[in-house]
Amino acid sequence: MLLLGLESSCDETGAAVVRDDGVVLSDVVHSQVELHAAYGGVVPELASRDHARNVAPVVREALSRAGVTLDALDGIAVTHRPGLVGALLVGVQVAKGLAWAAGKPLVGVDHLMGHLLAIFLEREGETPPPPPEFPFVALLASGGHTALFRVDGPTTDAVHELGGTRDDAAGEAFDKVAKLLGLGYPGGPVVDRLATSGDPSVFPLDAPMSFGAPGASLEMSFSGIKTRIATHVRERTTPLSDGEVAGICASFQRAVTTVLAEKLVAAARRESVRHVVLGGGVAANSELRRRVTELALAHGITPHLPDKKSCTDNAAMIAYAGAMRLARGEHDTWDLVATSQTALPRATRKGRGKR
Ligand code: KG4
Ligand code: ZN
């Protein structure tokens, strides 16, 4: 099967053509980062307008790079939740139009399913390591979501949350810390880069809700660590030196990646599964990748890390997740709606408990 996928849930307009064995024939991403950078975060109205401007050329480019026409497709998959509703609507309406015009099934995809299954994508020119076996435990860490999932199969009904953040998502914390340090948006990649040269002992931070702390669980919290940095920056009377900024980045990244790696491996052990998987933008973080690899191998668990292009938002993962639904005979009707919330049931309530 061959699917066209569309992604417009946040600040990337994506279209991709993917086979149901995970082979990516094309994957086009138009990033809006420059558009939103001046505002320090995504401006929803600007995002929707930019998606509307770029979606047609992005789709055309994806079909042309794959060397296919709409006739060759078996279905059209589109992210319809969760995300910014105005942004999602652009992709959903375009997907409906294309599916109707070409007489192909329309398949709505939950964006989080895309991230969880991105590990199965095979890009041209790569010899990917063997894919994970079901069941596996996945850490999905992005700008909007951070949680651990037990994944028994490639569809929503086979995915169960084991624990998630009680407040900020990990990517959101990276973005907020970068903003506090005057490093711009998005924060993850720049904090990742600066952390490599920083000395974490400049500003030591504990890993929040780690297993060293009493009452620790698979739940997480990232707002306290961000507040500690905010207070430190506010109380400073002189500007931070480059060395101090790099040190804070290193310390923050170490604390966050410690807790993410530790909880992922603990969850896998608790569930008695032998494979762990990363997904979402934060999965591109070099320290997280290293720590997860080391800790998993130390416990006889196989780590599976998607390539960095598959971690951040893209339409290839949406096409693949759509193919998994279509393979089960599932598709949607013309009344498919865009919704801000995920369909995956939450185990962790936001705002709950002591951090
Ligand atoms: O998955 P994604 O592209 O979009 C959402 O679904 O949210 O994730 C974006 C998030 C942003 O918060 C960004 O700062 C973070 O992923 N991110 C990173 C890195 N690259 C992107 N965080 C840490 N280290 C990175 N290298
Ligand atoms: Zn995402």
Image (spheres, rainbow, N blue to C red):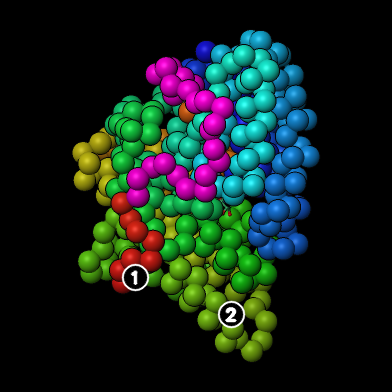
Taking the spot 48% from the left edge, 23% from the top edge, the residue there is 331
The relative height of residue 201 versus residue 256 in the rendered view (above or below) is below
Q: Amino acid at mark 2?
A: Val
Closer-to-camera residue (316/76): 76
Can see residue 214? yes
Q: Which mark is residue 233?
A: 2
- Extent of the magenta region: 322-346
Q: Which mark is residue 355?
A: 1
The reply to whether the magenta stretch includes residue 22 is no
Can see residue 320? no
The relative height of residue 267 versus residue 156 in the rendered view (above or below) is below
Taking the spot 58% from the left edge, 80% from the top edge, the residue there is 233
Question: Circle 2 — which element?
Answer: helix
Quarter where residue 307 is shown? top right
Image coords of residue 309 (percent x, y): 59, 37
Quarter where residue 38 is shown? bottom right
